[in-house]
Image (spheres, rainbow, N blue to C red):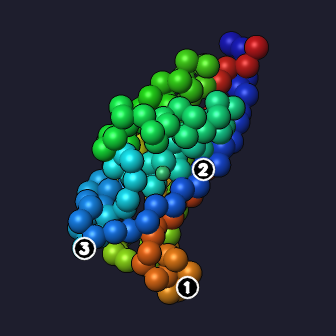
């Protein structure tokens, strides 16, 4: 039996959205109870946007802004899982498959520990991988900067892709 050979690519994604009253707070495809939510053209799920950019970056397919322009009415209020699923589809069409995703949410509030497993499952489902291949971390900003002042929430993500070589 011949040994499997794979090529690998890693990608990085970052996102920031402002926190404003009167919006639902969506993070990692999960609605989080909070007095404010993230402002954006879509549902403004900063974590899913960071993951989408990490995937597109790993595959060399550009970025979320090029794929889903924020002046396109199709994406107004859209569930960001739809954007992530479309990006994954594009990545898979190039022969790539996600291996794992690691990500961090930077939020002073609310506490997110109780939502991490649900986020992990939602992200894994959108990517078509198993929940153990997705890790979600949350950090405060020690009350420093825009995150510390609760003016916004940031997210960062890395994703590894592989495809059969040759
Ligand atoms: Mg965004």
Q: Earlier in the sequence, mark 1 or mark 2?
A: 2
Q: How many marks?
A: 3
Quarter location, residue 166: top right
Q: Does dot 3 land on a helix, a strand or a loop?
A: loop
Q: Quadrant of the N terminus?
A: top right
How busy is the neighbourhood of tag 3: few (under 14 within 10 Å), some, or many (20 plus)? few
Residue 13 is marked as 2
Residue at 65% of width from left, 49% of height from top? 12
The disc label shown at residue 35, or none: 3
Q: Residue at x 50, y 69 (%)?
A: 106
Q: Earlier in the sequence, mark 3 or mark 2?
A: 2
* Along the viewing direction, whichever of 96 and 44 lies nearer the viewer: 44
Please state the horizontal and vertical placement of residue 154, each as a whole percent of the image.
Answer: 51, 64
C-alpha gap between disc 1 and disc 3: 20 Å
Q: Secondary structure at mark 2?
A: strand
Q: Is residue 50 above or below residue 35?
A: above
**Mark 1 neighbour density, 10 Å: few (under 14) some (14–19) many (20 or more):** few
Above or below, comparing residue 39 to residue 100 in the picture? below
Q: Is residue 30 left or right of residue 69?
A: left
**Which residue lies under the disc numbered 1?**
144
């Amino acid at each position: 039996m011949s040994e499997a050979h794979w090529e690998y690519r890693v990608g990085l994604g970052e996102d920031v959205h402002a926190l404003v009253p009167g919006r639902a707070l969506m993070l990692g495809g999960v609605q989080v109870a909070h007095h404010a939510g993230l402002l954006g053209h879509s549902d403004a799920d900063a974590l899913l946007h960071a993951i989408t950019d990490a995937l597109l970056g790993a595959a060399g397919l550009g970025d979320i802004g090029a794929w889903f322009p924020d002046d396109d009415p199709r994406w107004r209020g859209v569930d960001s899982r739809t954007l992530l699923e479309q990006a994954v589809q594009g990545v898979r069409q190039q022969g790539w498959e996600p291996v794992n995703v690691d990500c961090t949410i930077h939020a002073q509030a609310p506490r997110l520990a109780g939502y991490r497993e649900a986020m992990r499952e939602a992200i894994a489902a959108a990517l078509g991988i198993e929940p153990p291949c997705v890790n979600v971390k949350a950090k405060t900003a020690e009350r420093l900067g825009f995150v510390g002042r609760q003016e916004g929430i940031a997210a960062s993500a890395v994703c590894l892709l592989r495809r059969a070589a040759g």
